[in-house]
């Protein structure tokens, strides 16, 4: 998620239990969003609700036919299944970022979203800096990361993940003066999905409502190429054109998506 600078205005913060009340209050102040003492998901006064409950946060569309909640979950569900059965170093994403033998590059994921790819890379042993510019999506990521840090089964993986709320292009420019440049920069711009699964449709609907369409892929790629030490990796739909401005050095193709790799120099 890249370039929108304003928060969605049709979102309110609420809490589902007393344990979530203080978190909801703090979030409403931090995000500048209304706080609801009571809520009804059937009430469409607000298009979406950011719900706090017992140390977790979820984003929920309102309305009678609205899909289920969207959240950052690094402990259970699909992410847990992939951690256990996802293929390890044989995964295409591992090859794309340059994982090989003992090499585990330090990675900046500058389109973090809900953090799934970042978590996969951290599971494989990489240190990952997640950059997410939407304050609302960042709040979901923050909650998911805190839960993972408190879970004995994945705490060591979560320890390799850090999170910042920043516009990716600006963040990349600021890192030009840093002594520690990312070895690999990972970019997954939002694009229209053709996947028919309910999960993808639900999440894409939420993301588009909250952060809008991504119009800055070319500028983000340019900024990434100016900073990365070894390579930039861009995830794309399998049949989509490459981002304008630079031709990838090579591509790795999967069934529905591919990775465009822009090599700057060889990884050690």
Image (cartoon, grey):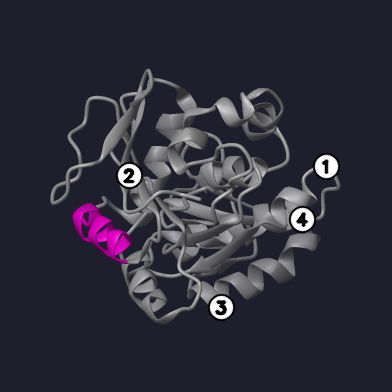
Residue ID at (69%, 68%): 23
Q: Is residue 192 visible?
A: no
Residue ID at (68%, 22%): 85
The image quadrant of residue 236 is: top left
Q: Residues within 10 Å of mark 4 (few under 14, many from 20)?
A: many
Secondary structure at badge 1 equals loop
- Specify start and end residues of the magenta stretch as a single range: 215-226
Secondary structure at badge 4 equals helix
Judging by the rendered image, the residue that carries numbered circle 4 is 149
Q: Earlier in the sequence, mark 2 or mark 1?
A: 1
Q: How crowded is mark 2: few (under 14 residues within 10 Å), some or many (20 or more)?
A: many
Q: Which of 189 and 234 is in front in this view?
A: 234
Q: Can residue 27 be seen in this view?
A: yes
Judging by the rendered image, the residue that carries numbered circle 1 is 153
Residue ID at (40%, 81%): 177
Are the residues at dot 4 and dot 1 in contact (C-beta closer than 8 Å)?
A: no
Q: Which of marks 4 and 3 is nearer the N terminus?
A: 3
Tell me if 181 is positioned left or right of 260 in this view: right
Judging by the rendered image, the residue that carries numbered circle 3 is 29
Q: Which of marks 2 and 3 is nearer the N terminus?
A: 3
Image vertical order of residue 127 relative to residue 89, above or below: below
Task: Please state the horizontal and vertical placement of residue 95, each as a whole percent of the image.
Answer: 48, 34
Q: Nearer the viewer, mark 2 or mark 1?
A: 1
Task: Please state the horizontal and vertical placement of residue 122, each as a whole percent of the image.
Answer: 63, 47
Task: Please state the horizontal and vertical placement of residue 201, each as a whole percent of the image.
Answer: 40, 31
Secondary structure at badge 3 equals helix
The image quadrant of residue 237 is: top left
Q: Which mark is residue 190?
A: 2
């Amino acid at each position: 998620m890249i370039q929108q600078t304003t928060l969605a205005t049709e979102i309110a913060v609420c809490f589902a239990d007393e344990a979530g009340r203080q978190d909801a209050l703090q979030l409403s102040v931090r995000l500048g969003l209304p706080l609801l003492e009571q809520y009804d998901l059937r009430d469409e006064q607000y298009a979406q609700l950011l719900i706090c409950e017992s140390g977790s946060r979820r984003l929920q569309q309102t309305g009678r036919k609205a899909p289920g909640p969207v959240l950052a979950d690094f402990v259970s569900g699909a992410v847990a299944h992939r951690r256990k059965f996802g293929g390890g170093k044989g995964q295409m994403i591992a090859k794309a970022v340059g994982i090989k033998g003992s090499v585990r590059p330090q990675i900046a994921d500058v389109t973090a979203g809900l953090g799934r790819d970042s978590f996969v890379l951290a599971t494989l042993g990489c240190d990952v800096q997640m950059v997410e510019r939407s304050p609302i999506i960042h709040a979901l990521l923050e909650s998911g990361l805190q839960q993972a840090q408190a879970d004995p089964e994945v705490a060591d993986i979560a320890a390799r993940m850090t999170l910042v709320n920043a516009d990716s292009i600006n963040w990349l420019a600021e890192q030009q003066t840093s002594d520690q440049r990312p070895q690999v920069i990972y970019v997954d711009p939002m694009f229209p999905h053709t996947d028919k699964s309910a999960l993808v449709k639900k999440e894409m609907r939420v993301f588009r409502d909250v952060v809008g369409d991504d119009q800055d892929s070319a500028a983000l790629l340019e900024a990434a190429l100016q900073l990365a030490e070894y390579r930039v990796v861009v995830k794309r739909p399998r049949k989509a054109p490459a981002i304008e401005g630079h031709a990838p050095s090579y591509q790795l193709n999967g069934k529905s998506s591919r990775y465009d790799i822009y090599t700057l120099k060889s990884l050690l």
